[in-house]
Image (cartoon, rainbow, N blue to C red):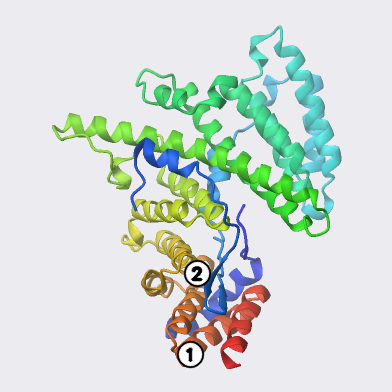
Amino acid sequence: MFRYFAATTARASNASRLGQRVVQSRRVLTGTACIGQIRKMSTQQNNSLSDGNVRYTIMAVAAAAGLSLFGLAGYAMFFGPGSMYPKPVRNLLREAGMAYMRPPEKQDLPKALECYKQALAQLDALGTSDSQHARDMPHVTGLVARVATVCTEMGDLDGAIEAYTDLLERLLGTDGMRDATTQVRRLLDDSLDKNERQGILRALGCANKLAETYEARGQRSKRRSAVLPHARAASTADADKAAQWYGWCLQLVMLTYQNHFNHQQLADNKQPTNTPSFDPDTLPSYFPVDIVTSLMYNAATFYSGNAQIELAEPLLQRALDLMRRGADGEETNVCRSSILMSHLANTGVMSGNLPAAERWSIDGLALAKRFPHNADCLNSFIALTYDLGIVYEAAGSLESARVQYRQAAEIAASTGDDDAAKLATDAMTRISK
């Protein structure tokens, strides 16, 4: 799940015909101290930079694919072979599948949800006396994950939060949910059973999804607060819960990585350090780079969306380090790196650090131009071009700013991104007054 300007199929399909046009255009996170800092909540709640009488609204770009995959890859759990389920449960799963595993316009999500819940209830009842169907078995927790997914697709975020919380409790127990450090110690134990390690990684993905869902519900309440005053309190409470679970995920990953890194340092007769290198080759083998960078990205966009730049910026920079800033030249990494740079340019704008915003914009555009047919590169190109316009406008170079805004507006309109096109057009109107 990503926020703001979500990439569309139309944009991806239009990328190729716009490629030629695009080509021609023009603090360190370490240790427990940073984990504690990540948990702090800022009271600021705006997404704009004030400069005299002018307010610059940022253009936040979402990844079309790749960086958003953490939620899928991290918690993906599959149903076991059909033979694992008693016949009544198999019948319910078959009925649910016929309602769910269909094209969107033919789905019957309420029916699917009801069947999945009935199947889960039967398994839980069996699990009280048959350990084969214990509540933490993969084929049972996989069903809980499916319930959460269907609830999300129905827009039932309350139900999704309930299911994800249930799933975490099944995987970790109440104590494990309360303190991520208990899972750090387990992951660092070389004798840990492979299935138990996999369970912790599933829990990590589930916690990330729980944070995302609290974030989404909080945003929905915030939109409603204009007509429903009590919704503002609900939005704040959900933002606090999202911060709690993003912090839990980051603590688990960062403390595990730091301890693993220092263990390797000692093995190589080197001094331990509070600053891991963030070289992808130094990550534990059970932490794929995609999972770590996506978690950092998800948390960073949450923090920047709440104007907590001091928390967002180091996460974005370390995610970029883990991707080696696209230095391998591989298309996916280059375009993902350009997405990260577009968000770093935004943090520069939001914090008033315009030299940093200019640097990230120029570096990001250099990457985005390399693969103009890629939707992620095209998305970031639009946002980075707009950000560069903000930098030029703030510096008083209005003609240069107008060129950037016009280019961002034209390309956004051509790709079907009406929101981004309007944002850039409004900026042109502002500097023409």
Can you identify the residue that label 1 sits on? 398
Q: Position of residue 420 (x, y in %)?
A: 62, 74
Q: Position of residue 18 (x, y in %)?
A: 54, 80
Q: Is 309 rendered above or below residue 88?
A: below
Which amino acid type is marked by label 2? Ser
SS at badge 1: helix
Residue 255 placement: quadrant: top left
Alpha-carbon span between mark 2 and mark 1 = 22 Å
Which of 395/16 is in front?
395
Residue drawn at (43%, 39%) of the image: 35
Q: Is residue 81 visible?
A: yes
- Residue sitting farthest toward the left: 269
Residue drawn at (44%, 54%) of the image: 310
Which of 37/389 is in front?
37
Can you identify the residue that label 2 sits on? 380
Tally the numbered discs: 2
- Residue sitting farthest toward the top: 129
Q: Quadrant of the C terminus?
A: bottom right
Q: Is 267 rendered above or below residue 8?
A: above
Assess disc 1: are there few (<14), some (14-19) or many (≥20) residues with their C-alpha within 10 Å of its C-alpha: some
Residue 117 placement: quadrant: top right
Q: Is residue 140 left or right of residue 388?
A: right
Q: Position of residue 362 (x, y in %)?
A: 38, 75
Residue drawn at (56%, 43%) of the image: 243
Q: Is residue 284 visible?
A: no
